[in-house]
Amino acid sequence: MHRPRAVVTNRAFTQTLDLLSPHCDLHANHGDEPWPRPELLRRAADAHGLLAFMPDCIDEAFLEHCAGLKVIACALKGYDNFDIAACTRRGIWVSIVPDLLTEPTAELAVGLAIGLGRHVAGSDRRAREGTFAGWRPTFYGRSLDGSCVAIIGAGRVGRAIARKLAGFDCELLMVDASSSAPAPSNARYAELAEALSRAQFVFLAVPLDAGTLHMVDAAWLTSLRPGALLVNPARGSVVVESAIADALRDGQLGGYAADVFECEDWARADRPEGIEPRLLAMPQQTLFTTHIGSAVREVRAAIEYDAAVNLLEGLRGERPHGAINDPVRRRP
């Protein structure tokens, strides 16, 4: 029997490749940039398994070219760039790694809030200009300590953010009408209107789906407490970046920090090519990182390894332990 053929779409840790190579005819991307779509399609055309990453977009058109696929193992948590229904119809397992990204993403979210509120990036730039001569009455900002904080979403990441805020003396409001779990001990549930009108810091911790696409629009931002700081470690298209820029310009929003951007949401046919230019031109009011929420070396290695185990399970004809679908027709 021929060995299955597997494709690793983006650069992976050596231990991930070492796990896969004894069991697969392995073709891996060793560069820092994802393969262009035509190149990925060429390499995946006769593949049985795919180890996929955030830059990948798997849709019906992609699957048409990959008739032999049995499993797509995603080294990620959010799968909005993957057409799960199309994979299910074609008998393809899709798996994710739901837990390992949670804590580092929450950690970065709190770091972004501190960095934005305390003007860390601007102060760093000032120190490097060569004119710093000691303390001046500048860069006065806002502290999490003593603030009212709202977390929109009470899933894994939202609750992890709440845990990490336990050491701050802040009033913590959580908004999630779909959650039946008790609020963390240092928080209480609140209606969205109350949370937005009172909070000085607002964290977004929701997945990207039909209900949250462009949730944070002009009307939503109008409901905010004037001057509030907004932190987005979730998905870029949860917000309308142009509306964020308008709210910053008008003073309704005091600052915006993000690790994610609309241009990354590959499944959107209308996604922009880059970050909203006006946001990039507002360094005093914004703080951005390059989707590094899970970019802790040990965490990324563990995520990839778990995804590789999912891949091997699917190739063996087993249900991957991280499967999120139940294919209607499983290929022999």
Image (cartoon, rainbow, N blue to C red):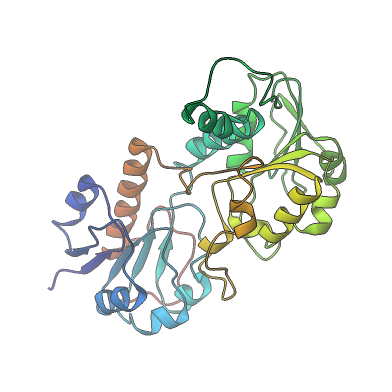
Q: How many marks are shown on the rendered structure?
A: 0
Viewer-proximal residue among 184 and 203: 203
Q: Is residue 248 left or right of residue 123?
A: right
Q: Residue at x 43, y 50 (%)?
A: 97
Residue 171 lies, with reference to residue 3, above or below; the image says above
Instruction: Give the x, y percent position of residue 270.
Output: 60, 74
Q: Is residue 55 left or right of residue 116?
A: left
Instruction: Give the x, y percent position of residue 1.
Output: 12, 73
Q: Residue at x 70, y 27 (%)?
A: 141
Which residue is the extreme one toward the top?
134
Q: Is residue 160 visible?
A: no
Residue 26 lies, with reference to residue 232, above or below; the image says below
Instruction: Give the x, y percent position of residue 286.
Output: 63, 43
Instruction: Give the x, y percent position of residue 68.
Output: 29, 78
Q: Is residue 287 visible?
A: yes
Viewer-proximal residue among 229 and 213: 229
Report which quarter residue 171 is drawn in: top right
Report which quarter residue 143 is drawn in: top right
Report which quarter residue 151 is drawn in: top right
Q: Is residue 138 left or right of residue 296?
A: right
Viewer-proximal residue among 298 and 86: 298
Which quarter of the figure is the C terminus placed in? bottom left
Residue 238 lies, with reference to residue 128, above or below; the image says below
Q: Residue at x 31, y 73 (%)?
A: 40
Q: Residue at x 39, y 58 (%)?
A: 53
